[in-house]
Every structure is written in structure tokens, then in C-alpha cells.
Image (spheres, helix red, strand yellow):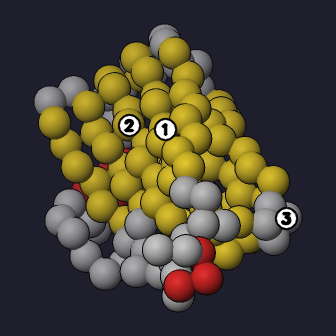
């Protein structure tokens, strides 16, 4: 199949990783920052440790905020199963995986930034995977 036969597909899909090794200090931490143009497809931010889950996952596209939600809020709001909203919190022991993936790719022209704001102690590590394309 040639690229001229692809309709509605994503070109040049990639995974970009980022993270913070612990102990993770409180405050803001940029995990992935990309220059556009491009497409956001999905992301996951895995947090290990922490005592209150008030670490916020933040996704900004072209300077506009798309996601800004804590692990605790995602659990309290019932975002613990697959849903059309695009945010899901998965738990496996001490690890909590905040996933982002909307039904359609989100376009960015200038920039895309995935970050966290840590407002709790005892976070051991944060790791992120961001899937994007053109």
C-alpha cells in the first residue's frame, strides 16, 4: 500500500518518553514537550508511590489546556473504566496509570506539552509515554 492510498491515517507515528526519577520533589515537572505541527494520539503517565494522589496530569496543546486532573479526582469521578471521555485511571498495586486517548486525534500547530504538578510526598517515580504523529 502506498501513502497515496491511505485515507484518514496517521503518518510517522512515534512514541516519545519522559519522566522523573525519585524521590520526586513537589512542584511542576515537564515530561514531554514537542514542536508542531502534529497529532496527539494517546498518552499515559504512570505514578509510583505517593500518599494522597493529588498529583495532577496536564496536557496543553497550542497553549490551551486540554487535561488538568489529579489521580484522586479521576478516581473520585469514576474514570476507572474505558469511556468515551478519553481519560482513564488504571491501578496496579502501588502504580497508577493515568491514560489519555480521545476518539479522534487532536491536532497541534505550534506545541504540545505533557507535564505533572506533584502536590504530595513519597512519589517514587513518574514515567510517561506519549504517542503522536503527523
> Can residue 116 be seen by looking at this rendering?
no
**The C terminus sits in image quarter:** bottom right
Q: Nearer the viewer, residue 36 or 84?
A: 36
Q: CA distance from mark 1 to mark 2?
A: 6 Å
Residue 93 image offset from top left, x and y in percent: 14, 30
Callout 1–callout 3 Cβ contact below 8 Å: no
Q: For the residue labelled by badge 3, is the local secondary structure a helix, a strand or a loop?
A: loop
Q: For the residue labelled by badge 1, is the local secondary structure a helix, a strand or a loop?
A: strand
N-terminal of the two: label 1 or label 3?
A: 3
From the viewer's perspective, tell me whether residue 75 is left or right of residue 33. Answer: left
Callout 1–callout 2 Cβ contact below 8 Å: yes
The numbered mark at residue 128 is: 1
Q: Which residue is mark 2?
A: 46
Q: For the residue labelled by badge 2, is the local secondary structure a helix, a strand or a loop?
A: strand
Q: Which residue is mark 3?
A: 110
Q: Nearer the viewer, residue 113 or 27?
A: 113
Mark 2 neighbour density, 10 Å: few (under 14) some (14–19) many (20 or more) = many
Amino acid at each position: 500500500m502506498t501513502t497515496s492510498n491511505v485515507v484518514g491515517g496517521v503518518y510517522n507515528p512515534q512514541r516519545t518518553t519522559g519522566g522523573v526519577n525519585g524521590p520526586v520533589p513537589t512542584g511542576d515537572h515537564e515530561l514531554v514537550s514537542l514542536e508542531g505541527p502534529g497529532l496527539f494520539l494517546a498518552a499515559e503517565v504512570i505514578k509510583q508511590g505517593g500518599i494522597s494522589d493529588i498529583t495532577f496530569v496536564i496536557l496543553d496543546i497550542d497553549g490551551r489546556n486540554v487535561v488538568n486532573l489529579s489521580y484522586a479526582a479521576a478516581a473520585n469521578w469514576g474514570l476507572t473504566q474505558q469511556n468515551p471521555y478519553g481519560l482513564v485511571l488504571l491501578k496496579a498495586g502501588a502504580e497508577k496509570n493515568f491514560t489519555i486517548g480521545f476518539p479522534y486525534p487532536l491536532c497541534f500547530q505550534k506545541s504540545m506539552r505533557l507535564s505533572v504538578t506533584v502536590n504530595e510526598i513519597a512519589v517514587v517515580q513518574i514515567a510517561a509515554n506519549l504517542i503522536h504523529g503527523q
